[in-house]
Every structure is written in C-alpha cells, then in structure tokens.
Amino acid sequence: MREKVVLAYSGGLDTSIIIPWLKENYDCEVIAMIADVGQGDDVDAVAEKARKTGASKVTVVDLRQEFLTGYVFPTLRAGAVYEHKYLLGTSMARPVIAKYQVEVALQENATAVAHGCTGKGNDQVRFEHAFQALAPELKVIAPWREWNLKSREDCLDYAEQRGISVTASREKIHSRDRNIWHLSHEGGELEDPANAPLDSTWQLTRSPQEAPDREEEVTIGFEAGTPVSVGGQKLDPVSLVELLNEIGARNAIGRIDLVENRFVGMKSRGCYETPGGTLLLTAHRELEALCLDRDLMHFKQQIALKYAELVYYGLWFTPLREALDAFVNETQNDITGTVTLKLYKGNIAVAGRESEFSLYRTDLSSFTMGESYDQKDAAGFIRILGLPARSRARIHQEVTK
C-alpha cells in the first residue's frame, strides 16, 4: 500500500508545486487539506486545482468560526501584540490549521503530514510543534528543507515546466497570507527596510488620502471580554469581524509596517493589514482601562507580552498557554460594556466608554472636593510610602557628616 501524506494546501505557489514534488520524490498518495480561515478564496476552485495537480483526495474544512472563538478572541482578551505592532494574524491561524490537518491524517490512516513553509520562517515551527503536540507519531515532510529550489523564481520555473497555473508572477512577487483577521505582505520591495511599501502592496485598506473626508463612528460591545455586537446589533463572530474589517478598511485603519524578530533568529520585514482587529484591540483596551483594578491591569500587561511570544513562536499547544488562558479568563469577568470609536483617515479616537462594572467614580475623580475622599488621609499615605526614602536619606546624611 502506498504511503499517504496529508498536505496543508492553499493553492498558492508553494503548495501548488508540492503535490507533484511529493509524488515524484516519495511515490505517495497526496491528500490535500484545505482550511478556510477566511482567506476569501473560491475553495471549490482551489480544491479542483489540487485534484488537477495530482491530489488523490481533497478535504475542505470551514474553520472561520473556530479560528475566531478558539484562537483570535483568546489572544485579543489577553491583549497580546508581538513587538508593539503585530496582531498575530498568521501566527494564530497555523495551530488551528495544523490541528485539523492532524485530524484528517488520523482519519485517513496517513503516515505523514506536509507543509509549504520555508526553512527560514516561523511557520515551520508553528506547524511542526502542533504536529508533535497532537500526533507525535506522524512523520513530517518539509519540501523547502529538502528540494534544490532556492527562490520563488525557481518555484515559478518548476510550476511552468509542469503546466501548473499560479497567481504569483515574476512581476508580482509578494508572498501574502490572508485570513479573516489580517493580510500579510512580504518580499518584493519590502525585502529592503529602506524602501517604503508600494501603493499597490496594500490590498485590503484604503490609504488615508483615499479615505472619507468625514469621521465615522462605531460602537463595539463586549461580554466578558469577547466582542459580541457592533452598533448595538448582536452578531456571530464571523459576521462581526467581517463588518469591522469593512468599517476599518474604508477608514484606512490597521496598516502596519514592521521589522520583526523571527523565532529562528533573524530579522524580517513585513507589512500587515488588520483593520477590524485594530478596532477590536483598541476598544478592548479602553474597556479594560475602565473596569480592571490597577494591580491586575498592570500585571496583565506582563502576561500579554508572554502570551504574544508563545503565539508568535508557535507554542499554542502548551500547558503554559493553557494556564495563561485560565488567568486571562479570570480577568475578563467584568469586561462587559461598550466602547465608541471615531475613525478618520487612519486615526482612531475614543468617543466613549460605558460599563456596569466601571471602577471609575466621578465622586472620587472629580476636582470638586466632596465627602467621599478625605484629603487629609493622603498625608499619612505619603508618609508611609516615603519611609524607606527618608530612612536612606538620613543614613547618608549621617555618613557624610
């Protein structure tokens, strides 16, 4: 019986040539697993392409809802952002794709799984760590670490020699990854960090110059830290993110240009478009500012940094990530309410925050002096706080006499 290999298949340049390459080099049966994470492709056309290039079977799974509820929203609740800017769109998608790739492999009695990630990138770690965590018995085939193709131009040559149609071209050489949360761009002019992105590089969002000449207001509602409504209308997760993507994109929200530190040790440069995600992250932070206790909020900021690293490094299926989720979920019990944002040509202004769990008290915060706060108490507080400083100052005074 021929060996079965399950390939995470997107229909892009890399995976398009991997099917024939696997058959030529492993004499195996290739099962293409197509994960719909909201990339906007015609999955039927992608499936047909997989069959035409040699896949013996194609499995399509709609992961949009699970991607959002099981990966994106937990990361949002954690407030995780990698290196100040990156909202982790690709990083979060890999573990859910790998999870279902493993499920298909086990259902089909396959002995191996394959991916189209290069040996330089983060995605190889994200896929393969998930494989090891979920089904360590499966063999992993990573063609980019085996074949003699060195560049995207080599891949284009390989595809042309075998009559495989690919959307990438020698003129349009960007590597892109899209899902319902974001769109990333690498390669081309972006390989030199001294170059600005071309206007044509951006695909989802309008430029500030093209955005409307008027503010647009949007109100986002949360329940226990999870977004549930836009403009007062309850929406399912997919519809909610799609709507916020539309609103953010037309107002030039969510463009990021980042030189980042890859997990494998090198710096890389990429551009990201995350319109809806940027709105959600901004609104969620504002609601936490209203409802979280000071010490808890400050400690959670430290957790957010670690959470972002775990996601970026591909360590989703780990006890540490699960434990951090338990902490984060506890912090979100009172993060219920609404935040209103005003959008204008790439800028986000906060127009209002409301929550029944708000810790903001006008009687305490107002400049009007009332009975709820005795100003004389501050003197004792400051004296106790300054005790170590006073003691140290007196010792130094005595020593220097």
Image (cartoon, grey):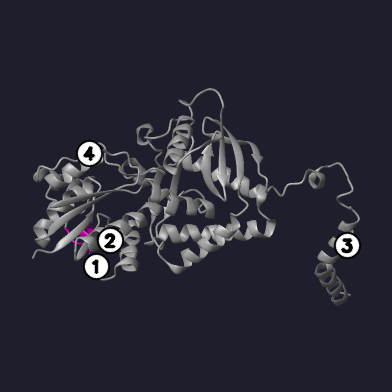
Say the numbered circle drawn on residue 138. 1
The quarter in which the C terminus is drawn is bottom right
For marks 2 and 4, give the CA distance. Answer: 28 Å
Foreground tag (1 vs 3): 1
For marks 2 and 1, give the CA distance. Answer: 8 Å
Q: Position of residue 329 (x, y in %)?
A: 55, 58
For marks 1 and 4, give the CA distance. Answer: 31 Å
The quarter in which the N terminus is drawn is bottom left
Q: Position of residue 392 (x, y in %)?
A: 82, 72
Three-letter code, disc 3: Gly
For marks 1 and 3, give the CA distance. Answer: 65 Å
Sequence-first disc among 1 and 3? 1
For label 4, the SS is loop
Say the numbered circle drawn on residue 167. 4
Sequence-first disc among 1 and 4? 1
For label 3, the SS is helix
Q: Are marks 2 and 1 in contact (CB under 8 Å)?
A: yes
Foreground tag (3 vs 2): 2
Say the numbered circle drawn on residue 380. 3
Say the numbered circle drawn on residue 102. 2
Residues in magenta?
A: 139-147
For marks 4 and 3, give the CA distance. Answer: 70 Å
